[in-house]
Image: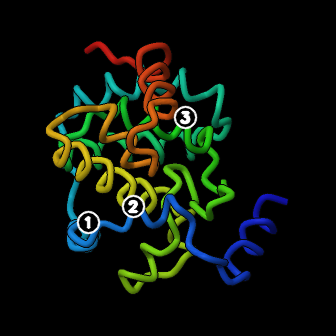
Amino acid sequence: MRRAALLLAFALPLAAPAARADRQMDPELRGVIAEALSPTECYTDRYERAVWFASMDSRLTRYVKDAREREQILHAVHCEARRVDVPPELVLAVMDVESRFDRYAVSSAGAVGLMQVMPFWPRELGMTNDQLIRIADNVRMGTTILGYYLRKERGHYQRALQRYNGSLGRPTYSDLVIDRLVSRWRYEN
Protein backbone atom coordinates (compact mmCIF):
# COMPACT_ATOMS: atom_id res chain seq x y z
CA MET A 1 0.00 0.00 0.00
CA ARG A 2 2.87 2.39 0.82
CA ARG A 3 4.52 1.64 -2.49
CA ALA A 4 1.27 2.35 -4.34
CA ALA A 5 0.96 5.67 -2.52
CA LEU A 6 4.57 6.48 -3.34
CA LEU A 7 4.09 5.66 -7.02
CA LEU A 8 0.95 7.79 -7.07
CA ALA A 9 2.82 10.67 -5.45
CA PHE A 10 5.52 10.47 -8.14
CA ALA A 11 2.99 10.11 -10.94
CA LEU A 12 0.92 13.13 -10.00
CA PRO A 13 2.31 16.48 -11.05
CA LEU A 14 3.15 18.59 -8.06
CA ALA A 15 0.91 21.56 -7.44
CA ALA A 16 2.28 24.95 -6.47
CA PRO A 17 5.64 24.49 -4.71
CA ALA A 18 5.25 24.08 -0.99
CA ALA A 19 6.66 26.71 1.33
CA ARG A 20 9.20 24.18 2.58
CA ALA A 21 10.50 23.64 -0.96
CA ASP A 22 10.95 27.38 -1.49
CA ARG A 23 12.94 27.73 1.70
CA GLN A 24 15.09 24.69 0.95
CA MET A 25 16.03 25.77 -2.60
CA ASP A 26 19.27 27.50 -1.67
CA PRO A 27 21.27 28.09 -4.90
CA GLU A 28 24.61 27.20 -3.27
CA LEU A 29 23.17 23.93 -1.99
CA ARG A 30 22.65 22.57 -5.53
CA GLY A 31 26.40 22.46 -6.17
CA VAL A 32 27.10 20.93 -2.76
CA ILE A 33 24.59 18.11 -3.35
CA ALA A 34 25.78 17.51 -6.93
CA GLU A 35 29.36 17.14 -5.69
CA ALA A 36 28.27 14.80 -2.89
CA LEU A 37 26.60 12.43 -5.32
CA SER A 38 29.94 11.47 -6.81
CA PRO A 39 30.76 7.98 -5.58
CA THR A 40 33.23 7.79 -2.72
CA GLU A 41 34.49 5.02 -0.52
CA CYS A 42 33.57 4.89 3.13
CA TYR A 43 36.76 4.48 5.11
CA THR A 44 36.10 4.20 8.80
CA ASP A 45 37.88 2.56 11.67
CA ARG A 46 36.52 -1.01 11.93
CA TYR A 47 36.37 -0.93 15.71
CA GLU A 48 34.46 2.36 15.70
CA ARG A 49 32.02 0.94 13.13
CA ALA A 50 31.52 -2.25 15.16
CA VAL A 51 30.80 -0.29 18.34
CA TRP A 52 28.41 2.00 16.41
CA PHE A 53 26.47 -0.98 15.03
CA ALA A 54 26.35 -2.76 18.37
CA SER A 55 25.00 0.35 20.07
CA MET A 56 22.50 1.46 17.43
CA ASP A 57 21.18 -1.78 15.93
CA SER A 58 19.17 -2.72 19.02
CA ARG A 59 17.67 0.77 19.21
CA LEU A 60 16.72 0.78 15.54
CA THR A 61 15.11 -2.68 15.76
CA ARG A 62 11.95 -1.20 17.25
CA TYR A 63 11.44 0.86 14.07
CA VAL A 64 12.99 -1.31 11.34
CA LYS A 65 12.31 -5.03 11.71
CA ASP A 66 14.35 -6.20 8.72
CA ALA A 67 17.99 -6.79 9.78
CA ARG A 68 19.38 -6.14 6.29
CA GLU A 69 17.56 -2.82 6.00
CA ARG A 70 18.79 -1.80 9.48
CA GLU A 71 22.34 -2.61 8.43
CA GLN A 72 21.96 -0.54 5.25
CA ILE A 73 20.56 2.43 7.18
CA LEU A 74 23.24 2.30 9.87
CA HIS A 75 26.03 1.90 7.33
CA ALA A 76 24.75 4.80 5.20
CA VAL A 77 24.22 7.04 8.23
CA HIS A 78 27.65 6.30 9.67
CA CYS A 79 29.49 6.80 6.37
CA GLU A 80 27.61 9.84 5.12
CA ALA A 81 27.59 11.62 8.47
CA ARG A 82 31.34 11.17 8.78
CA ARG A 83 31.81 12.36 5.19
CA VAL A 84 30.12 15.72 5.89
CA ASP A 85 31.24 16.00 9.53
CA VAL A 86 27.77 15.66 11.07
CA PRO A 87 27.14 13.54 14.18
CA PRO A 88 25.57 10.30 12.91
CA GLU A 89 23.20 10.19 15.88
CA LEU A 90 21.84 13.58 14.78
CA VAL A 91 21.06 12.06 11.38
CA LEU A 92 19.19 9.23 13.14
CA ALA A 93 17.22 11.78 15.18
CA VAL A 94 16.25 13.62 11.98
CA MET A 95 15.11 10.34 10.39
CA ASP A 96 13.16 9.45 13.52
CA VAL A 97 11.22 12.72 13.38
CA GLU A 98 10.97 13.01 9.60
CA SER A 99 9.88 9.49 8.61
CA ARG A 100 10.02 7.15 11.61
CA PHE A 101 12.55 5.24 9.49
CA ASP A 102 10.06 4.54 6.69
CA ARG A 103 12.00 4.81 3.45
CA TYR A 104 8.73 4.94 1.49
CA ALA A 105 7.31 7.87 3.50
CA VAL A 106 5.93 10.81 1.50
CA SER A 107 4.99 14.01 3.32
CA SER A 108 2.12 16.32 2.47
CA ALA A 109 4.73 18.70 0.99
CA GLY A 110 6.01 15.89 -1.26
CA ALA A 111 9.24 15.15 0.64
CA VAL A 112 10.32 11.54 0.27
CA GLY A 113 12.17 8.82 2.13
CA LEU A 114 14.04 8.40 5.37
CA MET A 115 15.27 11.98 5.50
CA GLN A 116 12.31 13.48 3.63
CA VAL A 117 14.25 14.97 0.73
CA MET A 118 12.24 17.25 -1.53
CA PRO A 119 11.63 15.74 -4.99
CA PHE A 120 12.95 18.77 -6.86
CA TRP A 121 16.50 17.73 -5.91
CA PRO A 122 16.66 14.64 -8.12
CA ARG A 123 15.23 16.64 -11.04
CA GLU A 124 17.77 19.43 -10.44
CA LEU A 125 20.60 16.92 -10.46
CA GLY A 126 19.50 14.80 -13.43
CA MET A 127 18.44 11.90 -11.25
CA THR A 128 15.19 10.00 -11.00
CA ASN A 129 12.68 10.35 -8.18
CA ASP A 130 12.90 6.64 -7.38
CA GLN A 131 16.41 7.30 -6.07
CA LEU A 132 14.79 9.09 -3.13
CA ILE A 133 13.54 5.76 -1.73
CA ARG A 134 16.96 4.13 -2.04
CA ILE A 135 18.54 4.17 1.38
CA ALA A 136 22.05 5.18 0.34
CA ASP A 137 20.90 7.93 -2.05
CA ASN A 138 18.36 9.42 0.36
CA VAL A 139 20.80 9.41 3.28
CA ARG A 140 23.54 10.91 1.11
CA MET A 141 21.30 13.78 -0.08
CA GLY A 142 19.77 14.35 3.35
CA THR A 143 23.05 14.38 5.28
CA THR A 144 24.63 16.63 2.66
CA ILE A 145 21.78 19.12 3.06
CA LEU A 146 21.94 18.89 6.86
CA GLY A 147 25.73 19.31 6.83
CA TYR A 148 25.44 22.31 4.55
CA TYR A 149 23.00 24.00 6.93
CA LEU A 150 25.11 23.15 9.98
CA ARG A 151 28.12 24.82 8.34
CA LYS A 152 26.00 27.78 7.23
CA GLU A 153 24.73 28.21 10.80
CA ARG A 154 28.21 27.65 12.30
CA GLY A 155 27.20 24.51 14.18
CA HIS A 156 24.02 25.94 15.68
CA TYR A 157 21.79 22.84 15.72
CA GLN A 158 18.46 24.61 16.19
CA ARG A 159 18.89 27.01 13.27
CA ALA A 160 20.37 24.32 10.99
CA LEU A 161 17.50 21.94 11.75
CA GLN A 162 14.95 24.69 11.18
CA ARG A 163 16.53 25.40 7.78
CA TYR A 164 16.52 21.69 6.98
CA ASN A 165 12.81 21.54 7.76
CA GLY A 166 11.97 24.89 6.16
CA SER A 167 10.81 26.27 9.50
CA LEU A 168 13.46 28.90 10.31
CA GLY A 169 12.38 30.93 13.31
CA ARG A 170 9.92 28.29 14.56
CA PRO A 171 11.55 25.97 17.14
CA THR A 172 8.94 23.18 17.28
CA TYR A 173 10.72 20.91 14.76
CA SER A 174 14.26 21.58 15.95
CA ASP A 175 13.23 21.06 19.59
CA LEU A 176 11.65 17.71 18.67
CA VAL A 177 14.77 16.52 16.81
CA ILE A 178 17.05 17.60 19.66
CA ASP A 179 14.79 15.84 22.16
CA ARG A 180 15.00 12.62 20.11
CA LEU A 181 18.75 13.02 19.82
CA VAL A 182 19.14 13.24 23.60
CA SER A 183 16.48 10.71 24.61
CA ARG A 184 16.90 7.98 21.95
CA TRP A 185 20.02 8.35 19.86
CA ARG A 186 22.79 9.70 22.07
CA TYR A 187 25.88 7.65 21.41
CA GLU A 188 28.69 7.31 23.86
CA ASN A 189 31.76 5.56 22.57
Query: What residue appears at the point 20 percent right and 42 percent down from the top-left corner?
Result: 153
In the rendered image, which residue does mark 3 sit on? 96
Residue under label 2: 24
Task: Name the N-terminal-most of marks 1 and 3.
Answer: 1
> Considering depth in this image, is 183 or 1 the residue closer to the camera?
183
Q: Secondary structure at mark 1?
A: helix
Q: Does residue 34 sit above or below 94 in this rendering? A: below
Q: Pinpoint residue 23: horizontal percent, then vertical percent.
A: 41, 60
Task: Estimate how packed mark 2 is, as few (under 14), some (14 to 19) or many (20 or more) residues with alpha carbons within 10 Å.
Answer: some
Mark 3 vs mark 2, CA separation in Å = 20 Å
- Figure coloring: rainbow
Q: Position of residue 83 (x, y in %)?
A: 20, 49
Judged left or right of residue 56, residue 2 is: right
| Measured Cα–Cα span from mark 2 to mark 1 | 9 Å
Tell me what residue is drawn at x 45 percent, y 82 percent: 123
Q: Quadrant of the C terminus?
A: top left
Estimate how packed mark 1 is, as few (under 14), some (14 to 19) or many (20 or more) residues with alpha carbons within 10 Å.
some
Q: Is residue 31 left or right of residue 26?
A: left
- Above-or-below relation of 4 to 96: below
Answer with mark 3 or mark 2, whichever residue precedes in sequence. Answer: 2
- Distance, label 1 to label 3, CA atoms, is 23 Å
- Asked if disc 2 and disc 1 are in contact, CB closer than 8 Å, the reply is yes
Instruction: Say which amino acid is labelled 2.
Output: Gln
Q: Which mark is residue 29?
A: 1
Mark 3 belongs to which amino acid?
Asp
Residue 78 placement: quadrant? top left
